[in-house]
Amino acid sequence: MKAISAGKHVYTEKPVASSLSGALRLARAARAAGITHGVVHDKLFLPGVIKLRRLVEAGFFGRVLSVRLEFGYWVFEGDQVAAQRPSWNYRAEDGGGIVLDMFPHWQYLLTDLFGPVSALYARAVTGVPRRWDEAGEAYDATADDAAYAVLEFASGAVASVNSSWTVRVNRRELLELQVDGTLGSAVAGLRHCAIQHRVSTPMPVWNPDLPDPLDYQAQWTDVPDNMSFDNGFKAEWELFLAAVASGQPFAWDLAEGAKGVQLAGLALQSSAEGRRVDVPVM
């Protein structure tokens, strides 16, 4: 806010605030000041996501039925092995929590690919209640370290979104999205994207009494790296600088960042109240 008041252009990480009211206050102030403002949306520039977007735009999936997003890894508690994330991430009073950290990412990523989210149900939990900080001192983890959500899109598609710092990885990458449509499916990560079209879909037969002869992984085809992929943060930063130089509005501004804060807040509300909540249009 001090930078905006001084007439400085602003480019910031997400979440832009810890509350929707705070995020909207920043967006309004920036608009009134006439500055160029932007929020990091780096996941849009990942090679795997770029490949996935090309598939969506080409109509590869037909009608998208469902999305499954899996993100996370095991963050060590800090007693026997030093934690690979800072301790404040696990204290709600310091702004920690996986919902506030990651749901702003999921908001812009899923909206960019599949359209607006209309409703959600979420359950945020603290799986590891005691951790050790950078000085080796034990502390109580008061923030959520995992969240499990079902998101509904205006299109009718549904997404299962699992985010966890208490999960051990059994996937190709730390972030993966599986998209299933009437004509084809894809599994995209940070860099890779594998596809299976309707015409090459196998026919599994459920028989738990016999070994399954199908090698399911082998029946997917990787989308090739047929273009050069730049660093995601760098690519968006260059677009922001170009907007500053030209005086044009930046696509991913503070108002867009507020939408991510909105989704995180609604996910926490849903978890606290144990119910499905609608996502108002902003």
Image (tube, grey):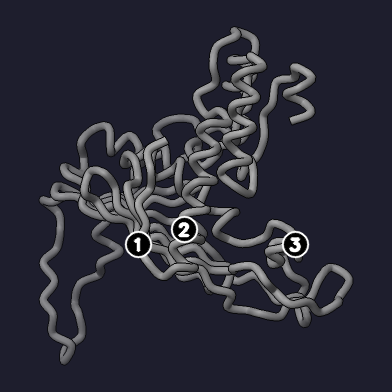
The quarter of the picture where residue 131 lies is: bottom right
Q: Pointer 1: what residue?
A: 276
* Residue furthest top in the image: 246
Q: Amino acid at mark 1?
A: Arg
User: Is 221 left, or right, of 81 in this rendering?
Assistant: left
Q: CA distance from mark 1 to mark 2?
A: 9 Å
Q: Residue at x 49, y 30 (%)?
A: 228
- How many neighbours does mark 3 have within 10 angstroms: few (below 14), some (14-19), or many (20 or more)? some
* Residue 194 appears in the figure: yes
* Picture coordinates of residue 25, whole percent (x, y): 62, 33
Residue sitting nearer the eye, 43 or 8: 8
Residue sitting nearer the eye, 87 or 208: 87
Q: CA distance from mark 3 to mark 1?
A: 29 Å
Label 2 or label 3, whichever comes before in sequence order: 3
Label 1 or label 2, whichever comes before in sequence order: 2
Indicate whether 167 appears above or below 172: below
- How many neighbours does mark 2 have within 10 angstroms: few (below 14), some (14-19), or many (20 or more)? many
| Mark number, residue 267 | 2
Number of on-image labels? 3
Which secondary structure, mark 2?
A: helix
Q: Mark 3, mark 1: which one is toward the viewer?
A: 1
The quarter of the picture where residue 42 lies is: top right
User: Is 56 left, or right, of 95 in this rendering?
Assistant: left
Q: Pointer 3: what residue?
A: 88
Q: Amino acid at mark 2?
A: Ala
Q: Residue at x 77, y 82 (%)?
A: 80
